[in-house]
Image (cartoon, coloured by chain):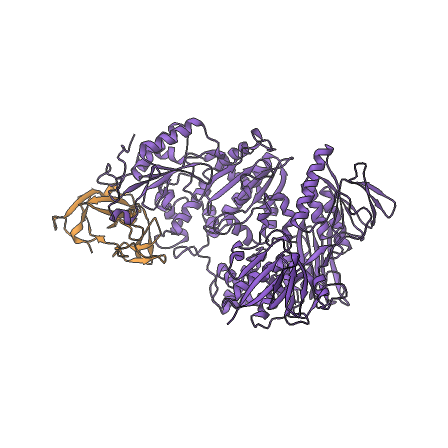
Amino acid sequence: MTTEHIVVVGGGMVAHRFTEALRARDTAGRYSVEVLAEEPRAPYDRVALTSYFQLKSPDELQLGDPALWHDPLVTLHRDTRATGVDRDRRIVRVDGGREVAYDHLVLATGSYAWAPPTPGADLPGVFMYRTVDDVAALRGWVEERRAALGRPVRGAVIGGGLLGLEAAGALQSLGAVSTVIQFADRLMNLQVDEGGGEALKRLIERMGVTVRCNTATQEIRAGKDGHVGSLLFADGGEQLVDVVVFATGVRPRDELGATAGLEIGARGGVVVDDTCLTADPAVSAIGEVACIQGACLGLIAPGNTMAEIAVDRLLGGSSTFPGADMATKLKLLGVDVASFGDAFATTPGALEMVYADPVNGVYKKLVLTDDATTLLGGVLVGDASAYASLRPMVGAALPGDPAAWILPEGSVEKGEIELPDSAGVCSCNNVSAGAIRDAVNHDGCHDLGAVKACTKAGTSCGSCLPLVKKIMGTELEKSGIEVSNALCEHFALSRTQLFNAIKVAEVTTFSEVIERFGTGRGCDICKPTVGSILASLYNAHVLGDDRAALQDTNDRVMANMQKDGTYSVVPRVPGGEILPEHLILIGQIAQDYGLYTKITGGQRIDLFGARLEQLPSIWKRLVDAGMESGHAYGKSLRTVKSCVGSTWCRYGVQDSVGMAIALELRYRGLRSPHKLKLGVSGCARECAEARGKDVGVIATDKGWNVYVGGNGGFTPVHAQLLVEDVPDDQVFQVIDRYLMYYIRTADRLQRTAPWQQEHEGGLDRIREIVVEDSLGLGAELDAHMARHIDSYEDEWKAVLNDPVRLQQFTSFVNAPDQADPTLAYVEQRGQRRPATPEERAGGAVLIAPSTLEVRS
Amino acid sequence: MTAVPATASSTATVVCAYDRLTPELGVAALVGGEQVAIFRLADGSVHAVQNLDPFSGASVMSRGITGSRGDVPTIASPIYKQVFSLLDGTCLVTMDKSPKDGQAPDLVVYPVTLDNGQVIIDLAGSE
């Protein structure tokens, strides 16, 4: 088969999705793809544009795996604008006159930001809000004006839709004061009704943004310096401004299609059929430029759907556009807004059921059929936690009293919902409830990981995961497959259940735990789990009573076992701040014992190659000098990484090292379902990479922002904002509660990121519990953490003082002075490392284990 | 525990006192140049297997976690977590890995005798 060549005009998110999906599905290599991108960079996440202000580089907005652009069948041209299409010759002309031939052309040119013709719109200081370059220019301007004016910059955003509120948020985060000028009678008039608009306005004004509705901007006037200076409104009002952002909507970039003679919709856009084809079978259009079923759609979800359909059709499939789901859920300036289905109750006879609480800034509306049973749509402002459950129910009957979905939690019992097969569950990847049921019933996917891998549900934003989990559970139950949360063959309970059982029964030894709640002798799965739970609950020494035999490999000797059975030793260096004499001591120990040294990712020093019997004498030297265990071996707090902060840094706004040390000393030794890493940055530049941690604390001018649920490793996740601008004591309280709640409810070996994603109601629900104390658990969590802090002791020091526990640190019970004779090392770059089997066999120069005396 | 008289073989070695063993915690011993991992279980029985972990090549089995699969007492490797029977050394869980070159997946089991409060290992009786 010869390769056919596809040319994609446009380098946005939909172009990326098309290319990614084509390369994933065209395994035979039938097509090659050439992407012509006008912007100087690969496709990026435009939806997340506003987060650019919290990022260090535009690269962080990157979409998907960058390896896509190195695929031999994919060519990406940046900085390349298409100027014309010759459909007879199947040629695209690009800037500079070059011609690119195609077998199939995909128009994915997207939209441009549209501004109403306004005198003065070309003045310096007037911006659009569409591309990374727009946003970068805006940021540069605001920073420069603030320096020049020596006062906060006055900003105005023209347009009070979704993008306008994003832009207002961006101005706020740049330290500008902002006013939103809205022509319509309410904010987000395309998504929310009058009541929702009112609630939204109140909430946004609480964030310090001024809102002017029913206001037309007549003219933008220059100030004395020739820059933008003021806005003149149609009602005669005037407002002083230093920067103006237009967010008045987008228009499809359909000029290529128009000049090529393709049909253009009444309101613009290249007309396509339900398979995304134009009247020319060699030309498709997808995304915002396509006029499909009579309209151009400015959301990413239908754009991605179109990309998938175009790919499917090219590969001989038969999918068609199912109609756009214009449902939206977003967080603007910290305010939840969601709108779905028939939000404006345009269906004849539709009933509206409304709950509004102006004090708490909540507005919720359900639109129902005239018999008040079938859900048609809704609007949620201030609290959109019901969105994930309700959106897929549009068109289906709501069980029980519909009011339960909008009244405060617990006031009316909610009915159990059973989604119809056609209901969309994951809108990012267009996965229906039926597809998830199929995966469970026919493809043998019996756990969340398998369902995710098979259907792709929940693999993008993850907000639907609790729902996916629930559907999977129901299906498994129906087919008689027991949904086993059992820890292992010895415990039928899940970790969470076992945690509560042990806590209530107040048992403290493994023998009691297995006698009361389990069977058999235990194993390498349940023993460490019980060991960890006992440590979390009582914080007694991990090697005390019968607990030594419970601990996993590393906890058992409080060091990290390496591949040859020796250990690495990591003393605690709180916040990465270290005394010169401690540095010297570490170096001295490494020299004396012949240990390999390496700086860790957590800002401390790892000493490799210590034998079991050498550990106590190494610890003794560290402990005598005032150092202690760094718990590098534990499913517990590891490190709190920090930047140098305001004490030295020219840019720091808070003492990040001081905060990191306080946090590390507070949570040291805290046993948890998995390891915990924290980070503290002294300003928004985020040099400590705190958002890649389980808890990240980032300094602001007013205090600290606390982010939670970040993760490096195999599945990197950025931590999400939990609370903003809080003082030190609140930082401690909110992290105390978050960590304790995680420790009590997470599965075995579940990091905070997946725990948070799969938690019912997600981060919003967790915030209610740990910040707003909605379950009344706060005091108990606080007391539990206080107990942990009070009972902390250094594990190394405790063992050094206990001759019985020290017995465990011998090489051979009948030859305690003899080192393991099978150890062998070679020298590399001036240090030792374990010899490979080839080196052992091939006569390399081997170094026997060092013979330094083992007890001091 | 295998009921072999303490004097049955000249290769039998006294390793340590029974009281030196902590229930469910292993120790290593050097017996005639071989490394042996010895475990006293909660029921009082004592078991001995090779200390060499066939899947990592490190001598670490004495530092693994004891447990059970069904009625079989087990030991799990502390390195890659393979599980072995303490009764006959069979590898019960391979964790989808193969042993190192030249190693059998199962552990060698050594007979253990208790005599006058002493733990005795007999290399010749290995299986």
Q: Position of residue A152 (x, y in %)?
A: 72, 36
Q: Residue A44 in the image: x percent, y percent?
A: 60, 53
Q: Where residue A398 appears, x then y in whole percent?
A: 66, 64
How many marks are shown on the rendered structure? Answer: 0
Task: Name the quadrant containing residue A108.
Answer: bottom right
Judge whether residue A347 can be spotted in this image: yes
Question: Which residue of the protein is positioned furthest toward the right in this rendering?
Answer: A236
Of A5 and A789, which appears nearest the observer? A5
Instruction: Name the one closer to the observer, A524 or A211.
Output: A211
Q: Position of residue A844 (x, y in %)?
A: 26, 44
Residue A347 lies in quadrant: bottom right
- The purple-coloured chain is labelled A
Residue found at x 68% / y 72%: A279
| Quarter the C terminus of chain A occupies | top left
Q: Colour of chain B?
A: orange
In front here: A629 or A784?
A629
A247 sits left or right of A48 in the view: right
Q: Is residue A189 left or right of residue A571?
A: right
Q: Is residue A673 above or below residue A805?
A: below
Q: Is residue A285 left or right of residue A460?
A: right
Q: Answer whether residue A415 is visible to the viewer in this image.
A: no
Name the residue at the front extreme.
A97
Asked whether, in this view, residue A140 is left or right of residue A715, the answer is: right
